[in-house]
Amino acid sequence: MDDVANFDVRKLLQDNTLSLTQKMEIFNNVIEEARRQKIYLFFRTTNGPSQDHITATSLETGKPTDMVMMASNNYLGLTTHPEVKRKTIEVIEKWGIGMAGPCSLNGNTTLHQELENRLARFKHCEAAMIFPSGYSTNIGVLTAILGKQDFFIGDELNHASLIDGARYSMAKRLVFKHSDMADLERCLKEVEKEPGQKLVAIDGVFSMDGEIAPLRPIVDLCKKYKAMLLVDDAHGTGAVGATGRGSLEYCGVEGEVEIVMGTFSKAFGCFGGFIAGSKALINWLRHFARSGMYTASVSPMVVAACLASLEIMEKHPELVRAVQENSSYFRKGLSEMGYEISTHETSIIPIFIRDRLKAYAIVKEAYERGLFLSLIEYPVVAQGTERIRVTVMATHTRKDLDFSLNLLRELGKKYQAIP
Ligand SMILES: Cc1ncc(COP(=O)(O)O)c(C=O)c1O
């Protein structure tokens, strides 16, 4: 197991003496060996709905096994909510499955407009635009508003979609140390006198660390240096803040951020993404965000599902409270056992094992014993910061949480990850 689990993928990627074909062959052999040893923990198959309890295929026996799901972004349990399913089916019956064309030509419906208007209200903005995914939302907005003459300033732990959008935009890129306001100010000062648009972009909730960005000082610095601010609130939307309106609500900066991004792939339980902002910004994006223009419009069934999810979020703040209470119960349990975790008030709880083999062993044994966890390693996070990532849902019961905590205690001790 050690050879496979300790395989240094970064070394392989950086090895200029090997051809791509040779690299692919080496990589393929590693994956095949990991599969043979039954320790390949990626692309595990589930067969059934994505919810708090799932059925997944055992790596050991190949048989379907019931598990508690602690690795899904379905924070409010809306993927299978009866009301969401009913309204989605109704729209499929009435509208069919797709628009077969982009929004700008034949794919815009009154349903799309209704969702965009309601998202704008939810985010306290003038207007909103939906995209086929969260990833393509960030690519679209960044390439539409930045060019060669402009400056992109981002936190070092930003999501890949912000990093890629900045690259594709051709803007000059500056990176500040994670959540370090002095370093952000250093970047802003460095470009203050330069012509060109300055844009600061940040995850509202960091997807692998579960931390909430310090948005108050970031907003103040952006105002001081006349930079625009984009907050990617993929994980905050629906799960963070007193009423689930996200990290901006949590930090008290609603109405002060020019570009608010969200996804439908987390608390909404579906897929797609959106930008909320001023009418002028949204009209600009409608005509210049290529990942929204040169692609078919989001299917009406997805729009219907997202409308139903949004309605539930707004009408049932108790769901938001439940995910927050469950998360704090779980965090408390883990830290009492001696695990190193993030203390931020979100549903993403990274457990820093700081030993890749131990992390592998825990995730693998937990899986075979009915607990689905995610293993996060390089290149998703820096080498040496490999972690187990737990995500908590509103619909987890105390029994689910206690089962998961007890197993993590037992395995943590067994593999010497905790005292
Ligand atoms: C912070 C952040 N932004 C954007 C995305 C992309 O969203 P989607 O999966 O909807 O494409 C993700 C998804 O993991 C994310 O965590």
Image (tube, grey):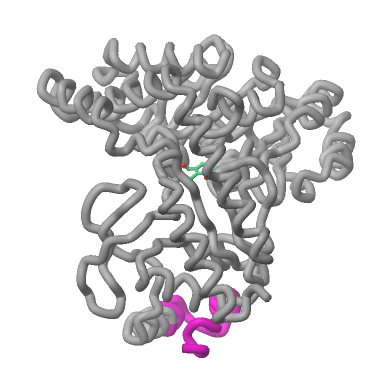
For the question of whether residue 300 can be seen, the reply is: yes
Q: Which residue is the extreme one toward the left?
A: 93
Range drawn in magenta: 1-26
Q: Position of residue 34 (x, y in %)?
A: 39, 82
Q: What is the quadrant of residue 259 in the picture?
A: top right
Instruction: State the residue at coordinates (55%, 23%).
Output: 243
Query: Is residue 35 rendered to the left or right of residue 419?
Result: left
Counting from the top left corner in percent of width and height, residue 187 is at 83, 41
Examine the rendered structure and indicate whether residue 134 appears above or below residue 106.
below
Q: Is 232 above or below relative to 309?
A: below
Residue 4 at x, y percent in the picture: 47, 85
**Is 218 in front, or is 224?**
218
State which quarter of the image contains the C terminus: bottom right
**Left or right side of 328 for 296:** left
Q: Is residue 140 visible?
A: no
| Residue located at (47% from left, 70% from top) | 363
At 56% from the left and 81% from the top, the residue drawn is 415
Task: State how many labels appear.
Answer: 0
Q: Predominant secondary structure in magenta?
A: helix
Q: Residue at x 42, y 52 (%)?
A: 399
Q: Is residue 256 magenta?
A: no
Q: Nearer the viewer, residue 44 or 196?
A: 44
Looking at the rendering, which quadrant does residue 319 occupy?
top left
Does 345 sit left or right of 348 as displayed? right
Pick the front one: 230 or 351: 351
Magenta stretch encompasses residue 13: yes
| Image position of 411 with respect to 370: above or below | below
Closest to the observer, 203 or 167: 203
Quarter occupied by residue 192 = top right
